[in-house]
Image (cartoon, rainbow, N blue to C red):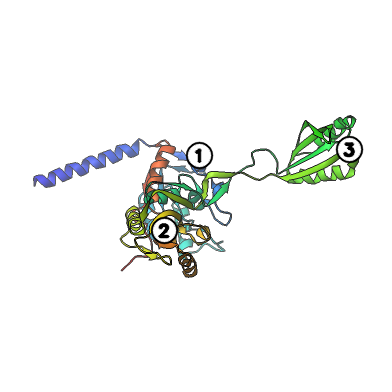
Amino acid sequence: MLSSRVRLVTTTARLVHSLIYSSSRSFMDLKALLSSLNDFASLSFAESWDNVGLLVEPSPPHTVNTLFLTNDLTEEVMEEALQKKADLILSYHPPIFQPMKRITWKTWKERLVIRALENRVGIYSPHTAYDAAPQGVNSWLAKGLGVCTSRPIHPSKAPDCPTEGTHRVEFSVTHTQDLDKVISALKEIAGVSVTSFSARTDDEEQTRLSLNCTQQALMQVVAFLSQNRQFYQKTEILSLEKPLLLYTGMGRLCTLDESVSLETMIERIKSHLKLSHVRLALGIGKTLESPVKVVALCAGSGSSVLQGTDADLYLTGEMSHHDVLDAASQGISVILCEHSNTERGFLSDLRDMLDAHLENKINIILSETDRDPLHVI
């Protein structure tokens, strides 16, 4: 009897703590929350084919007290989110991907939209933006390998060029007396910034102009120069590229501080992902005792990201049969863990990071019913 009372007191204490913790949280306006989420991991890093961001929006104004995290938004997960009074569901995978022609009760994805709107619950998906982020899914997956250094396999480009415009045009003005006339004419073109500097060409001092201009302005600059060829010489037109980001991008190429056997690496991965089984394709000439120093990984479906990468091991959720054969023929072993098993564990880290990023302003709940649809029997 005493044991039962102790359990009752403990349960009551936990409930009281939970209520106090919950009541200490405040609401966030949906737009403010979305802005903070974008600050955490910019949606600009998502792949162009992806469907990210706010997918379902209740009529404004909409405030969020409870943010519900899931890897996949199924009908079972939606039921859980509604029971837990979620105001916004962050579903890593976008439940709306292909365009919908109608919203009826006929298909499960249409029903998700209906239930979300009827219950005033928003749906947001970051997907490949979180794959690319420095603190995102692939970086979390790399934590299971052991001490290593890693870099993106396909680095992302910065959202903007370091300077204004998309192109730079440089040319030398032939005669000093023409300089003011040329500069004045160019400054009248919208989207053009002009700087000048001295240059020496063929032992002759000249003034060289450098123009940063937008795509639209470039056409007007070229038209001006073609009509006034007497004013200039030695013209160069450069396309301004957005710089690559060092720690942001798709996949990770991880170099271990110390090599380990393939067998040891398998056990590390199983432990990190909390899996009892993984699928293994041994590279040609490799055994479980073969050393692993370099691992190329990609959460989810990794074929397109990993293909052509030089490594001892590929780690991903799923790959096509022929891509596995191609890797194995090159002596690269492949570990497949099923698609969402390489992603779902990240949500626990995400909850803690978002708690800190959002300054504990809202409740953040992790789904208990979300799971990979495939399991070993």
- Can you tell which mark lies on residue 340? 2
In the picture, residue 354 is in which quadrant? top left
Q: Where 281 falls versus 189 (above or below)?
A: below
Residue 56 pos. (x, y %): 51, 52
Q: Residue at x 89, y 42 (%)?
A: 229
C-beta proximity under 8 Å, tags 3 and 1: no
Mark 2 surroundings within 10 Å by alpha-carbon count, few (fewer than 14), some (14 through 19), many (20 or more): many
Pointer 2 or 1: first along the chain: 1
Q: Residue at x 42, y 62 (%)?
A: 333
Q: Amino acid at mark 2?
A: Ser
Q: Residue at x 47, y 62 (%)?
A: 109
Q: Amino acid at mark 3?
A: Phe
Q: Is residue 121 visible?
A: no
Helix, strand or loop at disc 1? helix
Q: Where 343 falls versus 223 (above or below)?
A: below
C-beta proximity under 8 Å, tags 3 and 2: no
Q: Which residue is mark 3?
A: 231
Looking at the picture, tell me which residue is in the foreground, 301 or 94.
Answer: 301
Q: Amino acid at mark 1?
A: Ala
Dot in front, 2 or 1: 2
Pointer 3 or 2: first along the chain: 3
Q: In the orientation shown, which residue stands out farthest toward the left?
A: 1
354 sits to left or right of 224: left
- Can you tell which mark lies on residue 32? 1
244 sits to left or right of 363: right
Helix, strand or loop at disc 2? helix
